[in-house]
Image (cartoon, rainbow, N blue to C red):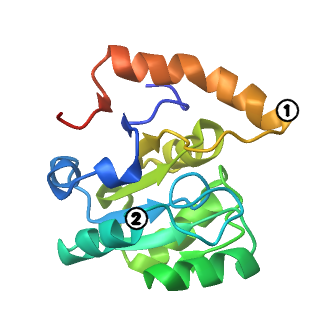
Amino acid sequence: MTLNMPSYSVDWVTQITPPMLHRMHVKAILLDVDNTLSPPDSQIPFSGTIQWVQKMQNNGFKLIILSNNFKWRVAPFAAQYGLPYVSFALKPLPVGYLRAMSKLHVRRSETVAIGDQIFTDILGANLVGLQSILVTPRITEGSASFLRRRHWEQSIRQELKNTGRHISPKE
């Protein structure tokens, strides 16, 4: 597996189920914010994500928000979910992931990182030795750097579909 390859991918975070996470043998979830739980730079959660977090907690999973955003952006957002957080995580560097796992008192082997960006969320998880789940971004960012990264991500997303590691909901 390359450093940029996630364990799995899904279209939306709410498609991730407790049985899926149990099969991965994880107990803790590190969650990205922008384009995973909400539109970029928004305090409004995507529909169903607060209920999804509650469902995960009710099934015994520990959750924490892990974001590269500053505290003033992350703290009020995390409060809506009732979750602890690590802001200014410096993803893909390992420091934020390690701080988040320390806060949750979990080991690498029992932790999954979930996010929409291969070159931050997934690369960082892989550098730390975590499993990861890539979500499809719901909003297209307009900056040239985002457009370039999203272009580079296309082949990885396609490989996940080709190898059966993209999980689609049953119709």
Is 39 above or below relative to 129?
Answer: below
| Residue located at (75% from left, 73% from top) | 70
Tell me residue 93's x, y (percent): 67, 53
Say whether marks 1 and 2 touch (CB < 8 Å). no
Residue 16 visible in the shown view: yes
Could you say which disc has been placed on residue 49 in the image? 2
Up-down: is 167 above or below 63?
A: above
Which of the 4 image quarters holds residue 49? Answer: bottom left
Tell me: 24 left or right of 85.
left
Q: Image point 26% across, 68% down: which residue?
A: 56
| Side of 25 relative to 154 (left or right) | left
Image mark for residue 144: 1
| Residue 132: percent from left, percent from top | 41, 45
Residue type, mark 2 in image = Thr
SS at mark 2 in the image = helix
Q: Amino acid at mark 1?
A: Ala
Q: Which mark is residue 96?
A: none
Residue 17 horizontal/vertical position (percent): 22, 53
Q: Name the quadrant containing residue 133.
A: top left
Q: Which marked residue is nearer to the observer: mark 1 or mark 2?
A: 2
**How many numbered discs sit on the rendered protein?**
2
Residue located at (46% from left, 42% from top): 135
Tell me what residue is drawn at x 58 percent, y 51 percent: 35
Measure how far apart labels 1 and 2 are at the Cα level: 29 Å
Local crowd at mark 1 within 10 Å, few (<14), some, or many (≥20)?
A: few
